[in-house]
Image (spheres, helix red, strand yellow):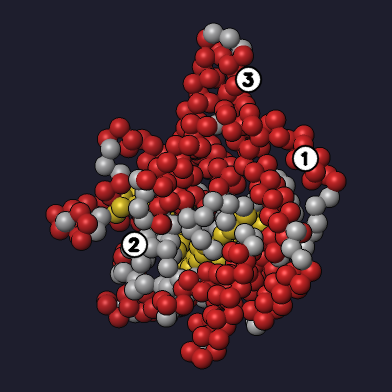
Amino acid sequence: MFYQFMKWYLGWMIKLYYRRVYTNGTEGIPNGQPVIFASNHPGGFVEPIILTTNVRQPIHFLVLGSFLTSPYLQWLFRALKMVPIYRRDIAGSQSIVKNESTFQYVFSALKRNSHILIYPEAQTQFIYKIRPLKKGIARMAKGFLESKTHEHMFIVPVGVNFIDVSRFRSDVFIDIGTPIKISIEEGQGNDWLYKTIEKTRQGMENVVFDVQDESRHAFVQDYVEIKHYAVQNELDIMVKTYVKSGKHVRNIKSYVDQIDNMTDDAFTELKGKLVDFYKKRAAYKLNVRTIGLIQEFRLFHYVLLIVGFPFYIIGGIINSVSLVGAVYVRRNLVKRIEYKSAVSGAIPSVLTIIGFVFFFVMGIVFHLGFLIIAITLPVSMYLFIYYNDLLDLFIQKSRYKRLSKNEKEELEKMLREINVF
């Protein structure tokens, strides 16, 4: 019950931090079968939340044991199906023996046809590249199959791809690949382990943004943003956050692959055009999404701006502690880009639910007015975020309209020259 509540609640908070989450391949997950998800890990602890809220069956996921040491929160970790895993280079050699109980937990869960989430790269880093995979995922698969309870299991490759992992109200692409059927009959010993790791790596290559030349990664981020908003853009308010759009997710992945395969000369030429475009865009104080807007502001949107303004102000005041706290921690205390979005989303999530419980209890004990405040907290946060989206688009669109005809045509020409794929 608690897991389902947190799945719903965290799914709601994801809707606040990310504008849209595009998914592909969820229908191919072998439900009712033992499954290990093999995912990349670019965003701290955001990936398990996004995956859990998009997959029907509950997911157990492995977390570094150093994050799960508090004895006061053990009940919470277990309720959220978080399983500790220990690494020699972080926790020391003496901690590795603790992994035996983790493996047994995983085997037991797989015997019940559960789903396990593993990060086979064994580290988090926002980078458009698959790093070498560790043996842990193959060892878990082998240990489970040797128990003889199942003749086979599945490893499902997952790509969690961000345009910008740290940017508020950015978009995310979830690409779930073809399940890899694993059987112990295919071999034994280290040879079997290496073959399984290689199959997993190949599966992840098909769904993860994977560019070998790291000097091209910043360019990939900018180019994906342009291509994405060129076709998936609209002047919206309170849209559906989770969008099943397999074709679009696969198209974006194909653009990344094409950049990876470009010759140095072709890449240098395209990069130069992109740099010129971004300089021009910055000079006009415009973002890419605004330039590519398909729909115009309508009377309905102006009405929303006027009617919603008081609620926007009230929502900002009511949630000021959560909003200011998230911004302060993000800017001053979180150094690694991989954790900025995770922490920025976690702080309002925790403070909102604490505030809700506090005012709910106050309402029961003292006055019903506190119950209204309790209900208002999450609703006002929701309205504040989405009004802020609309306000930002209005400001950006106003700037774009003030440009001269020649300036607009110049921007449009530059965009056409960039869109080579």
Which numbered mark, 3 or 1, is in the foreground of this view? 1
Q: How far from the left and from the top, in percent, is residue 38?
A: 43, 65
Real-space Cα separation, disc 1 to disc 2, in angstroms: 44 Å
Q: How many marks?
A: 3
Going from the N terminus, do you reach mark 2 or mark 3 first? 2
Q: Nearer the viewer, residue 330 or 93?
A: 330
Q: How far from the left and from the top, in percent, is residue 182?
A: 43, 72
Q: Which residue is mark 3?
A: 372
- Badge 2 crowding class, 10 Å Cα cut-off, few under 14, some 14 to 19, many 20 or more, is few
Q: Secondary structure at mark 2?
A: loop
Q: Secondary structure at mark 1?
A: helix
Q: How far from the left and from the top, in percent, is residue 165?
A: 48, 58
The numbered disc on residue 336 is none
Residue at 47% across, 55% down = 166
The numbered disc on residue 304 is 1
Real-space Cα separation, disc 3 to disc 1, in angstroms: 23 Å
- Among the 4 quarters of the image, the one containing residue 325: top left
Above or below residue 415? Residue 56 is above
- Among the 4 quarters of the image, the one containing residue 329: top left
Amino acid of disc 2: Gln
Q: Which residue is mark 2?
A: 123
Residue at 72% across, 60% down = 400
Residues at marks 2 and 3 touching, judged by CB atoms closer than 8 Å: no
Looking at the image, the residue that sits furthest to the right is: 299
Above or below residue 383? Residue 166 is below
Amino acid of disc 3: Ile
Which numbered mark, 2 or 3, is in the foreground of this view? 3
Q: Nearer the viewer, residue 183 or 250?
A: 250
Residues at marks 1 and 2 touching, judged by CB atoms closer than 8 Å: no
Q: Is residue 49 left or right of residue 143?
A: right
Going from the N terminus, do you reach mark 1 or mark 2 first? 2
